Amino acid sequence: MNFSQIPGQKETIFRLIRSVREERVSHAQLFSGPEGCGSLALALAYARYVSCENRTDHDSCGVCKSCVKYEKMIHPDLHFVFPVIKNKKDSEPVSDSFIEEWREFVKRSPFFTLNNWLDSIEVGNAQGMIFATEASEIIKKLNLKTFESDFKIMIIWLPEKMHQATANKLLKMIEEPPEKTLFLLVSDEPDKVIPTILSRCQLIKIPGFSNNEIRNYLVSRFNAEENKAAEIAKVSNGNIIRAVELFENEDSSLQNLDNFKRLMRFAWKRDVISIIGWSEEMASTGREAQKSFILYSLRLLRENLMLSLGQLRNRLVFLAGDEVSFSDNFHPYINQNNIYHLTDEFNLAHSHVEANGNAKIIFLDLALKVTRLIR
Ligand SMILES: [Zn+2]
């Protein structure tokens, strides 16, 4: 990953490059921004730029020995720490237990969520964690001499998922870093990183992508049709992961809208038989589809509230295609009296699905709550 492969974020890239050229590279930096802002991609491109033997004013060279190894993510001075899951033989594995899978996954696309990553290494309900066992691994790696570069670089993806003991060890390393060591922390939720670490890092705050950047990315990378790409860019709100998901799951979007419409219709009519049927249908889809439906519903509720509050459609309301005609009729039912309760119920259902609860009960319960709240 080099800077030119990142479809936007020019200002952040400019600042990062300048810090290297002016030799102001801070030894601990925290890359952070909203989900889907490309923070990991930026950290990867930055690490490569710092290590490049022949960098230009704009990017790493792409051909030197360092760049070639960075491309494959096998540079001996580049280390990764990221959440992993417990497996049968290792009770608490370290990141390197999954390094092959990690390299393959990141190479496919550097834009992904924790759940995307965990789902790629195990199907099921595993919780990702940077375990206590990682602490000694970090110390071991950073006490090595550099092999080929001026810097040893450790990229820590999602330090908020770090076991307390590991975080404490890391803190010591950041306070008194071994020579020529660079820590690049990449966080989605910096407020969950322990404050003592946070306060010792230089913060690289990253905004979401712009609509144009997302539209161009969908067109160039996925051959999306211009209008479709623009519509998706508008609803994805700067989140490139969401944009790609929307593009790839256009069918599931239609399915989600249909399920949402039916739920609301049955709820309004207090048609309990249909509600039970609907819940059973929802329960028979997979966990990912269920979560996708709930997140979709939360977005639709929010946008309908905006319509109810009289917001101009093109300014604040992010609706596409069939959602527009449905919402024209539906929005009067969503208002300030029920939106908080509705949102709470959908969020609750989401956390129950994540925790592998009984889906039939979760969706029946949700549907009955909606029945009460929608009148
Ligand atoms: Zn190079």
Image: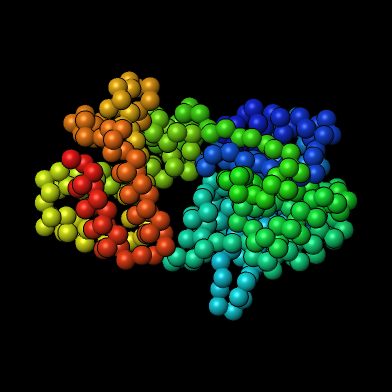
- Please count the marks in the image: 0
Place of residue 366 in the rendered image (x, y in percent of width and height, measured from the top left) = 27, 53
Q: Closest to the observer: 268 or 143?
A: 268
Place of residue 123 in the rendered image (x, y in percent of width and height, measured from the top left) = 44, 66
Quarter of the image that includes the N terminus:
top right
Residue at position x 67%, y 32% in the image: 13
Residue 23 position (above or below residue 173) = above
Residue 86 position (above or below residue 89) = above
Q: Closest to the observer: 62 or 148?
A: 148
Q: Closest to the observer: 30 or 341?
A: 341
Place of residue 96 in the rendered image (x, y in percent of width and height, measured from the top left) = 67, 65
Residue 235 visible somewhere in the drawing: yes
Image position of 147 (left or right of 261): right
Residue at position x 49%, y 65% in the image: 126
Residue at position x 62%, y 71% in the image: 92
Residue at position x 32%, y 20% in the image: 312
Image position of 357 (left or right of 67): left
Residue 42 position (above or below residue 104) = above
Figure quadrant of residue 201: top right
Q: Closest to the observer: 72 or 125?
A: 125
Image position of 130 (left or right of 112): right
Place of residue 153 in the rendered image (x, y in percent of width and height, measured from the top left) = 76, 50
Outermost residue on the front side: it is 337
Residue 258 visible somewhere in the drawing: no
Figure quadrant of residue 163: bottom right
